Image (cartoon, rainbow, N blue to C red):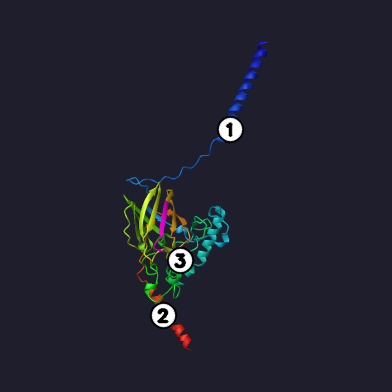
Amino acid sequence: MTRHWLAVGVVLAAVVAGTTASLDSQQARSRAVSAPAAVAKPYVAPRTPWGDPDIQGGWTNVNENGIPFERPDALAGKQLEGVDDSELAELVKARDEARVRGAAGIGGRDTGAGPVHWYEHYGAKNSRAWMVIDPPDGRIPPQTAAAQARIGGRLGGRGGRAGGFGEGGRADSWLDRSMYDRCISRGIPGSMMPAIYGNAYDITQAPGLVAIRYEMIHETRIIRLDTAPRSGVRSHMGEARGRWEGDTLVVETTGFDPRTVYRNGSAKMTLTERFKPVAPNKIEWSMTVDDPDTWTRPWTFGMTLTADPEQPLFEYACHEGNYAMRNILSAARAEEAQAVSGTQR
């Protein structure tokens, strides 16, 4: 009898233990399901000795080369965030193949434009399908009627001032050529934008200041981190004022020289940049263009800057051995002489 009740007790204890273990297991699974997924903490930039976010060093936009500025017609109806990684990889592959096909047209012995190894844009690992972020359709807003009249009047003769090196335009005088053609300035945001070479930047900080040096044409921007009144002096790079919003450097630039103002904009143009560090080797850069005399609404575009501490800024000796101006002007005179000769026959 004693052995019988002892056996029953053993069985009951086993059942209770099993039930308890089962309940513990179910509760553990329930806690695992209901627990929120771990959220990656946003990147926090290191600090300078005086406490500002530290974004100093060498940076490049070389991997953004070949990204269409506006949304291509082939991607009509797509949103920028709707282009998945595999689709972007196919776009990047096609862009790189096009660059390789066009290599003979920009460098090497065939054109005399310099050896192919000068060019940095092969194999670019683009970060996005196009650059314009806002409006959401990826297109620059329409120009105002006043801008169309103003810019139309400015573009005369052979097509107006050249927007960049080798882009055509008037050639009656060297003054007809763009500041970029003349090795003087690429302006803002021209100096920020990717090109076939010269894509390095150097960012240096000091208390109350950020300086950005650009490899191409060796322009330097001094960004004051204060609210001092602006001087009112107009310049090729404009007058910049910056501030920190968390880890993001926000820079507002006004006061552009009419000869280098972005996209033939007006004296009212304000360009607002954001340098947002998102990883130890990445900065998300964007620019908002606000010019009510030129576009019907503000618009924004952006790209990724990548840390490249091993890439010092090369010397940009644009004027040395540069016969571009002489050749552009002499070719225009030859073209005119040929036209006159043709009409006299």
175 and 153: which is toward the camera? 153
Q: Earlier in the sequence, mark 1 or mark 2?
A: 1
Q: Which residue is mark 3?
A: 146
Q: Which residue is mark 2?
A: 333
Quadrant, the N terminus? top right
Judged from the image, the secondary structure of the residue bearing numbered disc 1 is helix
Describe residue 19's horizontal placement relative to residue 224 as left or right: right
Q: Is residue 107 visible?
A: no
Residue 314 in magenta stretch: no
Which residue is depicted at the point 43% across and 50% down? 276
Task: Provide the residue span drawn in magenta.
Answer: 266-275
Q: Which of label 2 and label 3 is nearer to you?
A: 3
Q: Which residue is mark 1?
A: 30
Describe residue 231's horizontal placement relative to residue 70 as left or right: left
Task: Give the quarter of the image for residue 16.
Answer: top right
**How many numbered marks does the figure carry?**
3
